[in-house]
Amino acid sequence: MSTIFTKIINREIPANIVFENDNVIAFKDINPQAPVHILVVPKKEIPTLNDIKPEDKNLIGEIYLAIGEIAKDFNIAENGYRVITNCNQYGGQEVFHIHFHILGGEPIGPMRA
Ligand code: 5GP
């Protein structure tokens, strides 16, 4: 089932898009949890991490290449940042189209507050 991220990919709703290629898009999170908070999203609708298939392995690599480019563009590569993907209920996933949160621009702190 499509989510709000497909609407962003299809330009049906606005977003602050910071990166795009044939397979991957990235945009600023609407409710940022850090000075830099960007969501990196495959255009393919994959609901959760559990749904990644062997044929998606290049796509997952492309996502991490995009993350590296975005981190350089936003000048957070050198100081560092965190990448998070939430999965299902216990992971706190709200949007069921996989996405990779980039959090940076300040010390992000321990994994569990
Ligand atoms: P999750 O909890 O699924 O890992 O994260 C979903 C993220 O999507 C949240 O950080 C939330 O703020 C963000 N989000 C939800 N709806 C929208 C939207 O319409 N636009 C943007 N840019 N971000 C959204």
Image: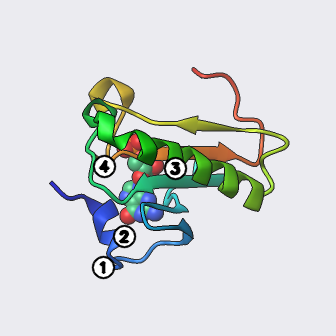
Q: Amino acid at mark 3?
A: Glu
Vertical placement of residue 23 versus 80, above or below: below
- Secondary structure beneath dot 1 equals loop
Report if the CB atoms under discs 3 and 2 are less than 8 Å apart.
no
Report if the CB atoms under discs 2 and 4 are less than 8 Å apart.
no
Crowding near the residue tagged with mark 3, few <14, some 14–19, many ≥20 C-alpha atoms within 10 Å: some
The x, y position of residue 102, in whole percent, is 60, 46
Residue 8: which disc? 2
The x, y position of residue 27, in whole percent, is 52, 63
Q: Is mark 2 within 8 Å of ligand 1?
A: yes
Separation of residues labelled 3 and 2 (CA atoms)? 19 Å
Vertical placement of residue 106 versus 14, above or below: above
- Residue 4 is left or right of residue 18, and the answer is left
Assign the N terminus to one quadrant of the image: bottom left
Going from N to C along the chain, the mark reached first, 1 or 3, is 1
Identify the residue shown where x is 44% and y is 67%.
22
Separation of residues labelled 3 and 4 (CA atoms)? 16 Å
Going from N to C along the chain, the mark reached first, 4 or 1, is 1
- Secondary structure beneath dot 2 equals helix
| The quadrant where residue 109 appears | top right
Report if the CB atoms under discs 2 and 1 are less than 8 Å apart.
yes
- Secondary structure beneath dot 3 equals helix
Nearer the observer, 39 or 110 = 39
Q: Amino acid at mark 4?
A: His
Look at discs 1 and 3 and give the one toward the viewer.
3
Crowding near the residue tagged with mark 4, few <14, some 14–19, many ≥20 C-alpha atoms within 10 Å: many
Question: What residue would you read off at disc 4?
Answer: 97
Separation of residues labelled 2 and 1 (CA atoms)? 6 Å
The x, y position of residue 45, in whole percent, is 27, 53
Separation of residues labelled 4 and 1 (CA atoms)? 16 Å
Identify the residue shown where x is 43% and y is 54%.
41
